[in-house]
Image (cartoon, helix red, strand yellow):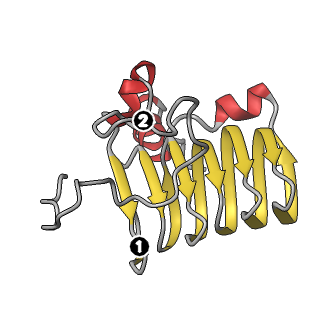
Amino acid sequence: MTLAPKPSAAPAAPTVGVRPAPMAGQAGAPMGVPARPAARAEATERRTLVVGRGISLQGTVADAERLVVEGTVESQMIQASELFVAQAGVFKGEMQVEDAEIAGLFDGTITARNSLVIRASGKVTGVARCRKLSVEEGGQVSGRMEMLTDAQAAATIAPRPVAAALGDLSAPAPADA
């Protein structure tokens, strides 16, 4: 979804706010240069949901591959490929992702099948599960930390609704006792 730019005298600039770790060579880049390198072009094609500053979202998010939280999100369960919680962002609930970067507050349960990065301004409270963990100096983890093995990470890949539907189609009906 693309929004029309606000009228202004200055050239249009993205309004996403704080971005994940800047890529090399971005400082002083001319206008119109993509924020991500061409090799990561598929990331820009992903279905992305941005919850902006001052926005609160409660409920279920479906079919978002990338979630960027600058405001507040409260959800019982979200599955996505990527999660980024900006410095002013707050996420409360449960999240299953491939990769997560927390620069704000995450309160709940996060399962990162690949990597979990907690920035210096980030705080994770609750349960954090991941295969790879990186915590910058100043980043905080309060609660329980679990490191996933390759087998455990692979077991969490299939989305629950698909697995349930396949189980209903392929498993024989249980015999009555």
Residue pushed farthest top?
39
Up-down: is 19 above or below 40?
Answer: below
Which quarter of the picture shows residue 125?
Answer: bottom right
Q: x and y percent of residue 162 in the render? A: 42, 39
Which of disc 2 and disc 1 is earlier in sequence?
2
Q: Residue at x 40, y 40 (%)?
A: 165
Q: x and y percent of residue 1 in the render? A: 19, 52
Q: Nearer the viewer, residue 101 or 172?
A: 101
Q: Nearer the viewer, residue 106 or 148?
A: 106
Which quarter of the picture shows residue 17?
Answer: bottom left
Do residues under tags 1 and 2 come within 8 Å of each other at their CB atoms?
no
Q: What label does residue 120 carry, if any? A: none
Residue beneath disc 2: 29
Q: Within 10 angstroms of label 2, few (less than 14), some, or many (20 or more) residues?
A: few
**Which amino acid type is marked by label 2?**
Ala
Separation of residues labelled 1 and 2 (CA atoms): 39 Å
Q: Is residue 45 left or right of residue 88?
A: left
Q: What label does residue 59 carry, if any? A: 1
Look at discs 1 and 2 and give the one toward the viewer: 2
**Which amino acid type is marked by label 1?**
Gly
